[in-house]
Amino acid sequence: MSQYWKCHGTFAAMLVIASAVAAKGADPQAASKDQTLSVEQIVELVRPSLVTISTSGRESREHGLGTGFVVSEDGLIATNLHVIGEGREFSVELADGTDLKVVSVHASDRHRDLAIIKVAPGDKVLKPLAVSDSNKLEQGQPIVVMGNPLGFKQSVVSGVVSAIREIEGQEMLQLAIPIERGNSGGPVVDRTGLVHGIVNMKSLREESVGFAVDIKHLRSLLDKPNPIALSRWATIGALDESQWTPLLGARWRQRAGKILVTEQGTGFGGRSLCISKVKPPEIPFELAVTVKLNDESGAAGLIFHSDSGHKHYGFYPTGGKLRLTCFQGPTVFTWKILKDVATEHYRPGEWNRLKVRIEKDGIKCFVNDQLAIESADGTYTSGQVGLAKFRHTEADFKHFQAAKEIASTDLSEEEVDRLTGLVSDLPQLLEVKPGLVAALADSREASGDLLERRAAALERQAKELRKVAADVHAKGVVADLIHLVKDGDDFDLMRGALLLAKLDERDIDIEGYLEQVDRMAREITAKLPKDAGETQKRDALAKYLFEENGFHGSRSAEYYHRANSYMNRVIDDREAIPVTLSVLYMELGRRIGLKIEGVGMPSHFIVRHVPAEGEPQLLDVFERAALLSRDDAAAIVLRFTGRELADSDLEVSPNRRILLRMIANLWGLARSETDGEAMLRYAEARVAIDPTEPAYRDERAQLRAFGGRLAAAVEDLDWLLERRPEGLDVDRIHQMRSAILERLP
């Protein structure tokens, strides 16, 4: 681990607040070389040029706070790349509180950790700071730094340049000043008002030592920009533009196979639309979505026969009822409520399946497969389909479909009776055996819903029932894993990775993500000449992922976020740890005709391209598919383990081993969070992938017992006692089994 930390850490603040420094008539211009400004004058000079940069995290909450400063009157702002985050949404605010519209990331340099943001000044007159044209400050020269440390906006601290250091291969200015979270991106100003550097990190060894990037690198970046529109940059949670068109404001996002909408729309009554680009079938056809509202006083649901404007039909829940409306214009005076009904089949606060059947002579609306509304209204007979929300509603949508006929999610009466009987007669959790879970897993979606409703009705059993519901889901996913790997190691690795994510994220549409990966491969192939060689294909793959679509290795404090191990989130967020980013690279490579192997080195996963002709080539996908020599690989192993490279470190990782490595990452995160339920899910997956490994059975037995699944734990212990693998502590297993049996009725 580096001894230095990008300015996201939390340490004791050593601040001099700029607001406490009274400006005393300083002229806000850079001084001449012979004129030395006081700290107060520096503050007066710099403050109007300082900006606060706020970024959002993976769950759309405020994630970080950093600093930037104006470098041109037309809206260029300098900061660190890690302040805005690769692929993050961010906002820019002037010192007077004015929010500036972000237009693009004008330039960025990952190697130097620099970024230049382009904003629209509007009616604001921006005041750029003067940038030094000299190469470096002198050792011992006084400097002033301004920023937003620990959220204290427009704070100032003064110190000196203590040295020029090489940090992680970079020449940096070493500053004898305290650096805290929020200082990143702030200007390092000399006593004449010239900017010589950009604050970048603090030392973990010394509290009052920080580091800055030399301003000469910013000058180079200004000379050779590489602009990326904000719409391309801020990709986390963005809607797939090839599938959806949002209208009338609000914030529509995609996450784990769901569409989420927040914020009020700009239409009357807070209306906002999300139009599907898929052309609906000819009449008759059906349209469906599953929706959950955060507040039943709001409204959100389906639209159809839309003109991609203010005219359309809408079927949606509102106020605990179901409503069918014909929207004939932009205001409530042009809206015609066709039906407004209450029904016992709608479940407030839960997921509800909405379906509309459009026929030549009318409209039929269903909720949870039960007919709720019929209408013969024929105002509109064609148009697009999609989603809508109203007022302050926050809503989640999943499983959107438009087809000639959509299969019912309802079960037969016999199946309902069977599941209801199983759920109603469910014994105490400690008596539930895997056979019962398997019986429920035959219809895991429906049985999961039944279990959730019973848990709500029977509060004293809710905790145990939810555990069983999770087991049912996990059992189904594990069954899919078993089926996937049953014929050996030559299986669909992308499907396996998505199944691991589905253990935790139940709503993932695996087939949808597989199609998305196929579509990505087709986009790469479409740009290649027909006679493209393997090196040309490999270069095109890297360009597509890292340059054109912003995929990148996670380097922020969110490196250890579980989302980096969920393949669906990697595809959505374009951020990952080495193994998941490598799996995506491998699978895209396979689809465009490249043989790419996984190489599971200690603590770092890389890949190897094996061409039909020529020598194999190692690549570090985490570093944008950088080419690696054997010496490079040895340096990585030495850095992470402190030992020399062994031949075994570069062996091919079979698909099973790759999945087990991904599970190990999730396991470690769950263990650090003391999440026993997640650990058990991962233990189930481990046994599915490698059912003969005794350690995995032992591990699962302990977790089952810890989670109250006593009968299931006994089955694992019996398996171990029957086979007695070498090294098994038989006495310990017997003691554990006896202790569990004493707790069973």
Image (cartoon, rainbow, N blue to C red):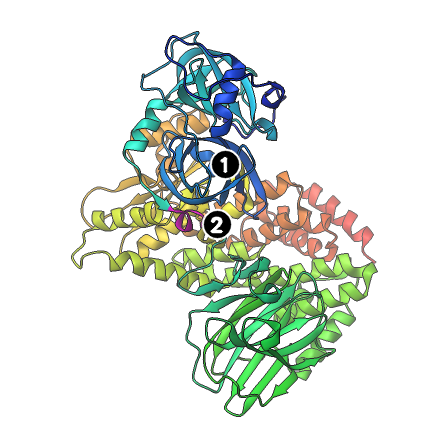
Q: Is residue 102 visible?
A: yes
Q: CA distance from mark 1 to mark 2?
A: 14 Å
Check disc 1: other Cα within 10 Å, few if <14, some if 14-19, many if 20+: some
Name the quadrant of the C terminus: bottom right
The local secondary structure at tag 2 comes to loop
Residue in the image at 36% along x and 61% along y: 518
Foreground pick, 572 / 83: 83
Question: Which residue in the structure is indicated by mark 1?
Answer: 556
Q: Is residue 700 left or right of residue 560?
A: right
Compared to 302, does 623 lie above or below? above
Q: Is residue 386 left or right of residue 653?
A: right
Looking at the rendered structure, the kind of residue marked 2 is Ile
Question: Which residue in the structure is indicated by mark 2?
Answer: 236
Residue in the image at 31% along x and 50% along y: 544
Q: Is residue 407 left or right of residue 574?
A: right
Question: Where does the image place residue 539, in percent across and percent down from the top left?
Answer: 25, 46
Check disc 2: other Cα within 10 Å, few if <14, some if 14-19, many if 20+: many
Q: Is residue 525 left or right of residue 156?
A: left
For the residues bearing labels 1 and 2, Cβ distance under 8 angstroms: no
Compared to 85, does 458 lie above or below? below
